[in-house]
Amino acid sequence: QVQLVESGGGLVQAGGSLRLSCTALGSSFSISAMGWYRQAPGKQRELVAAITSGGVTNYTDAVKGRFTISRDNAKNTVYLQMNSLKPEDTAVYYCNADYKQPFRRSSNSWGQGTQVTVSS
């Protein structure tokens, strides 16, 4: 099983920046797509950004031009650089990864979540 460990959340003023990191831990695995989701109070969890193993990215319209997703395959780590933050970006951010281990079916894992709060 692969565990995702997140870091980098916090409190920031509107217009500020934060960088989230998520590292996959485990043995003998390969990761395909990785992504960041968020869930605000009273709302459904939504995809923020995703990146394939080859570096192809996808963003939800609300963050295009402000957020950048990247990954370091050697470190099994995905990052989310968040600039020009807005109060509506306030949410718990979750890392997600599709992975494969030898002799097992492809699986999916979630991080524990990290709180991002943007004050106005």
Image (cartoon, rainbow, N blue to C red):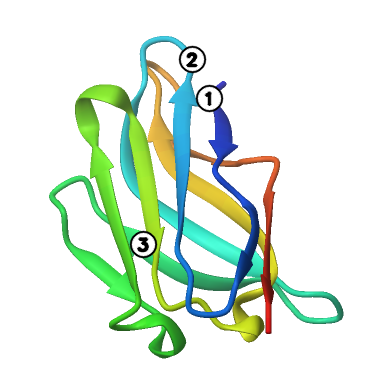
Q: Amino acid at mark 2?
A: Gly
Disc tally is 3
> Relative to 54, is 89 above or below?
below
Residue in the picture at 29% in, 24% down: 75
Residue in the picture at 57% in, 38% down: 6
Q: Earlier in the sequence, mark 3 or mark 1?
A: 1
User: Helix, strand, or loop for circle 3?
Assistant: strand
Q: In this orientation, which residue lies closer to the viewer: 45 or 118?
A: 118
User: Helix, strand, or loop for circle 2?
Assistant: loop
Residue in the picture at 75% in, 74% down: 40
Q: In this orientation, which residue lies closer to the viewer: 41 or 85?
A: 85
* Residue, disc 1: 2
**Label placed on residue 50:** 3
* Residue, disc 2: 26
Q: Quadrant of residue 80?
A: bottom left
Is residue 27 visible in the rendered image? The answer is yes
From the image, which quarter does the N terminus lie in? top right
Q: Callout 1 environment at 10 Å: few (<14), some (14 to 19), or many (20+)? A: many
Q: Are marks 2 and 3 in contact (CB under 8 Å)?
A: no
Q: Amino acid at mark 3?
A: Ala
Q: Earlier in the sequence, mark 2 or mark 1?
A: 1
Q: Going by the picture, which residue comes out furthest to the left?
A: 54
| Foreground: disc 3 or disc 1 | 3
Marks 2 and 3, how far apart at CA: 21 Å
Query: In the shown orientation, is residue 116 left or right of residue 2?
Result: right
Marks 2 and 1, how far apart at CA: 5 Å
